[in-house]
Image (cartoon, coloured by chain):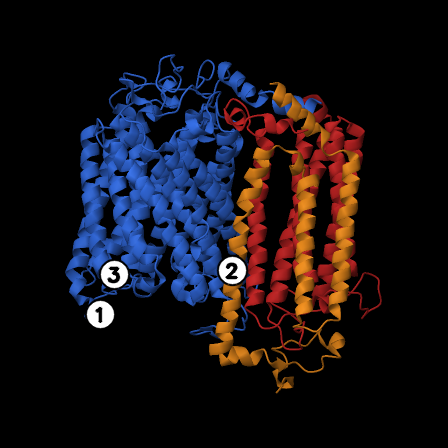
Chain colours: A red, B orange, C blue
Amino acid sequence: MSTATTVTPTKMWSGGKSPFNVEYGKLMMWYFLMSDAFTFGAFLISYGTIRFSTNGWPDPNEVFRSFPFAPEGVHAPLVFVSVMTFILIISSVTMVLAVHAGHNMDKKGVVRNLILTIIGGILFLSCQAWEWNHLHAEGAWWGHNPFLNHDGTASSTNFTNYFFTITGFHGFHVFSGVIINIIMLIMTLTDKFEKRGHYLMIEKAGLYWHFVDLVWVFVFTCFYLI
Amino acid sequence: MEHIHTIEAEHHEGGGTKEIWKVTIILSVLTIIELALGFWMMGMPLESSLRLAVKGAIVILMLAKAFYIVAYFMHLKHEIKNLIMTIVVPLALFIWFITAFLFDGNSFRHLRNTYDPHFKEQSTIKVEKKEEKKEETKTETKEAKPEERKTVE
Amino acid sequence: MSNEAVIHSPVEIGAHEEHGEHHHHHETFITKYVFSQDHKMIAKQFLITGMFWAVLGGLMSVLFRLQLGYPDASFPWLETILGKWAKGGHITPEAYYALVTTHGTVLVFFVLTAGLSGTFANFLIPLQVGARDMASPFMNMLSYWFFFAASVVMLSSIFVETGPFSGGWTAYPPLSALGDASPGSKTGMDLWIVSMALFVVSSLLGGLNYIATILNMRTKGMSMTRLPLTIWALFFTAVLGVLSFPVLFSGFILLIFDRNFGTSFYLSDIFVNGVGALPNEGGSAILYQHLFWFLGHPEVYIILLPAMGMVSEILSVNSRKPIFGYMAMIGSLFAIAVLAFLVWAHHMFVTGLNPLLGSVFVLLTLLIAVPSAIKVFNWLTTLWRGNIRFTPAMMFAIGFVSLFISGGLTGIWLGNSALDIHLHDTYFVIAHFHIVMGVASMFGMFAGIYHWFPKMYGRYLNNTVGYIHFWVTIAGAYMIFWPMHYEGLAGMPRRYYDYSIWESFKQFAELNRFISTVAMIVFAAQLLFLFNFFYSIFKGRKMTSLNPWQSNTLEWTTPLRPGHGNWPGEIPEVHRWAYDYGKDGVDFIPQTTPVGADESHH
């Protein structure tokens, strides 16, 4: 287990091979995700900065309190967003299982789990669409904030501005993740990876998908919980 | 070359289905705790230190979740140390990124509260009919009915 | 099972090797010169596009220097070129601001980022680490074409009815966020932001490639501590870009929403003349500055580090001495790269930044002096008692060191928040950053072009013209920017259209005219260089030896005109670091030479 540490670092770095034991594509995906982390980080930190420089802020439990098909005026804070969170976590799990199946050259497993992941992604996007639509019907949009601050004072529009921008940007990532996964599915079904002898592409798509899940952890906390 | 092979073995070892399910359960439990804290927080007064502490706890739980996703789902824990370091170390830049931005945001608020009477006044004017807000919010924006505001204090 | 087989066998390198050996398929003009995936061709594309922009950006500076130097004179020929932007031979204020803004944007991003690190990262990384090509040649090609698209959009913004963006290269809101704020804030700003977004994509694609190539594709024996310093510098440059450009990207997205979708991220309490009070409330223009400078400061080092790396290499080669303090050089590059991320708010001391926070930024900023000084001392000690060959490349490298010292010293002044209250937004700042970042990096770029031109085109640049180019440029650079320090100390603010209406700055009328005149002469000298460059591509003195500078690095082991794949046979193995000059009485020992039995250790 600890044999990895017995390899002297100089040997790993001495050239002629990857010092990380990974092919360049995976390395690039990791570094791309890091740079994307800075994109999302900058968004969320801007949100925090504006929130810190403002005197009041709306109560998320008052804003995000509805649920599809529930009667008008229902007060169910955090419920809908928990459903969304679990959908994304489960889709992440199925993605790991797909990657795992790819490692074992198990085409059937890859296909099954990829389909489940795609369904999870589409479900999440549908939930988000519903929520946006609902908030829009309440009068919330970029530049419009119908909600009051915690203490009943008027709120600046930046609450909704940031909410729609950041969840929108995240939703866009989910959307592109779904597209990537669909491409992966097609490539798997047409035996592209089988011919190549490895499913490394699935692994890279998986990294992207988990990153989307990771970002949601932060978005969920920043907008819905605190 | 032998060494490399042992790394391969370790590389392959990580990320069995058992581990995946274990991490799924951990993530779910963490989320449920977060939600429970969120519900608990609703009843607390606005500026209480307990509320702040709960928020802190939620942030820590968030970081724990992030750790489990990156380490196990994204498989980073099972990569070799070189790769882990090149990815984790640059993320330390976020510490100063967050600190400086939020500190300056906070300072900007103080600045405006001290020197900008209009800004200060704005944040003390309550919009009326908070109780009936559910019906009113659809049409009522702060620009729409400024005359309904009343000064508190 | 099979996954591991792919990861652990050197298939990636092997695949490229095969590509290099069986290079039979015929290349068309399009695949060879236009949509080329060969890193050497992409480097030349970056270089020539960069040169195009350098000429245009330089010409803009000549035009606005005309206004500053001769505010009362009228130049009818200006109306011929600029039309309504120079009615009666006078550049209008709008045109003046547009010229200043475009000059800044173009020089900083298109010339000194894409033109400098795009060129030399592409050209040198695979050649010096011993790789067939970049990790992903396709992404590399995309990187250039995104840059090209950005260029086209930026160029088109010059020709729109309301003019290009005119609110300064930093594009601070509200000028950049409100279309009604100024003519340039309308279509010009839309195009500016689209162009910059494309540019960010280009530099991300490039940067990811550079990092992956340097880490993953080094040839056998090329450990990290055997890399030439150019590669280390380009590596840190790429890391800076990959981690800081996304932040700018976020800032731009918020700006786009402010411009087009009625948000107020950056806007609050604004009254526009002729429009009235705006409803936007709750935003903070300072936030944009934070986001911008979180990129903007690392950007300075994105520009400077490649120049530093190339200068280190050229100084060592032409002093026939190993670089002094190789590990200290890497350490200071690393320190600069880390500090680059921690000091952005020193551009914002007078925005109302919290003084306590400001003092931390002062501390961190002044810390940069330490690695910078280490580098300067190492360059000087590399030269010390060297067997110096004053090639044009060497002249420019030494010029770089001189400029870096002169410009760096004033940085210590500006890094102090107390002094900055007086110096902020004066000509002192202009002088500082033009010398240390603008001209110094240009010198690094020239040094690189003169040094690697034979590898690029198989011919030499003309030396005599090179020396003229050097002396005019270095003398001119000091004559332009040295006086600006005095103007700045006297409080003369930057970005003003006409200083003659001010009693306090009337005394500088002569000096401004002098600066403008020198600026034109220096610009003319650059045209001389351009002529030299293009003439020498076709008619220059032919290379007779494969290694004209007797250099140790791997790029000189390739054939005269390396094809796609760089080495016809196997990639050479590396046995030593890149700086064995004058060792054991041998003038130079290439990296490919195995270590002899009785060789001394360095």
User: Which of C356 and A174 lies nearest the eye of the viewer?
Assistant: C356
In terms of secondary structure, where does tag 1 sit? loop
**Residue A14 placed where, x, y %?**
50, 24
Residue A185 in view here: yes
> Which amino acid lies under the numbered mark 1 shown in the image of this protein?
Ile
In terms of secondary structure, where does tag 2 sit? helix
Mark 2 or 1: in front is 2
Q: Residue at x 69, y 36 (%)?
A: A183
Residue tagged 3:
C488
- Counting other residues with Cα less than 10 Å from the Cα at mark 2, is it few (<14), some (14-19), or many (20 or more)? many
Q: Earlier in the sequence, mark 3 or mark 1?
A: 3
In terms of secondary structure, where does tag 3 sit? helix
* The disc label shown at residue C501, or none: 1
Q: Are marks 3 and 2 on the same chain?
A: no
Callout 3 touching callout 2 (CB < 8 Å): no
Q: Is residue C460 left or right of residue C239?
A: left
Q: Quadrant of the N terminus of chain C?
A: top right
Mark 3 or 1: in front is 3
Mark 3 or 2: in front is 2
Residue tagged 2:
B101
> Which amino acid lies under the numbered mark 3 shown in the image of this protein?
Gly
Residue at mark 2: chain: B
- Counting other residues with Cα less than 10 Å from the Cα at mark 1, is it few (<14), some (14-19), or many (20 or more)? few
> Which amino acid lies under the numbered mark 2 shown in the image of this protein?
Phe
Q: Is residue B119 above or below residue C200?
A: below
Callout 3 touching callout 1 (CB < 8 Å): no
Q: Quadrant of the C terminus of chain C?
A: top left
Gap between marks 3 and 2 measured at Cα? 30 Å
**Residue A119 placed where, x, y %?**
78, 44
**Residue C508 placed where, x, y %?**
18, 62
